[in-house]
Image (cartoon, coloured by chain):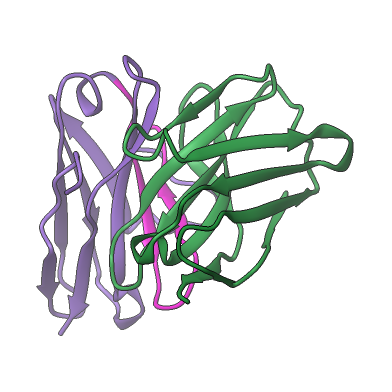
Amino acid sequence: QSVLTQPPSVSAAPGQKVTISCSGSNSDIGNNYVSWYQQLPGTAPKLLIYETNKRPSGIPDRFSGSKSGTSATLGITGLQIGDEADYYCGTWDTSLNLGLFGGGTKLTVL
Amino acid sequence: QPQLQESGPRLVKPSETLSLTCSVSGGSISSNTYYWGWIRQPPGKGLEWIGSFYYTGSTYYNPSLKTRVSISVDMSKNQFFLKVNSVTAADTAVYYCARHWATTQEFDFWGQGTLVTVSS
């Protein structure tokens, strides 16, 4: 069972918006940056969001990240079929010096 | 941009040791900007951080695996290694090596991953 809690699945129609939540605690999300990863079937995870709300070069602005307290959220607007993937949140527990990932959320674009 | 490549046996027998190598090109593992880590993903399941090292020699491990895992480094070859002792079927997974920032901790570059199966 993951320390960071994500919904197992979310779905929405093409062109719509979806949000994926990631819930943690004060020792992890509450006091550290959050990152988000997209994993397409059969491929390695790809960094989507870093430092909670920043996008690496090449990631469209349809993807956004935010945080409030001990929860973080990934937002995706203008959904496309190609966005169907598993999404993982990640952070670091600085008190224990360990890496943490959420259990993953499968996005279905109907 | 760095490239990371995992290598090692794809099949390991129960109770034996799983050994993997991550070869890094296009970036130095002796940089003070990054940690270098291992993550695994059992078939159909989520990501699990295994452990990471920093160029100073510090290593950090997932408490759930700490007694069976070790990460070592060969700076001269720009490689780092993972060993998992006393493996069981539960250690069957795709194993990834990845780079993460020392200050903000995101994993920005990943290897393609290698599936290791534990079976007799």
Determine whether A91 is above or below A59 in the image.
Answer: above
Q: Give the residue furthest to the right.
A: B76
Question: Which quadrant holds residue B93?
Answer: bottom left
Q: Is residue A79 left or right of residue B80?
A: left
The residue positioned 16% from the left and 20% from the top of the image is A26
Image coords of residue B31 (percent x, y): 74, 26
Expressed as whole percent of the image width and height from the top left, the position of residue A90 reads 33, 41
The magenta segment is: A32-51
Report the residue at 69% width, 53% height from top: B21
Residue closest to the eye, A67 or A22:
A22
Q: Residue A50 in magenta? A: yes
Q: Residue at x 69, y 51 (%)?
A: B22
Q: Residue at x 29, y 67 (%)?
A: A86
Q: Which chain is the one coloured purple? A: A
Is B40 positioned to the left or the right of A66 in the image?
right
Rendered hue of chain B is green
In the picture shown, does residue B58 fall above or below A22? above
Instruction: Kindly indicate the quadrant of the structure image that contains residue A107.
Output: bottom left
Q: Does the segment drawn in magenta span residue A27?
A: no
Residue B114 at what x, y percent from top left? 57, 68
> Which percent across, then down, holds residue A19?
15, 56
* Quarter of the figure with residue A28: top left
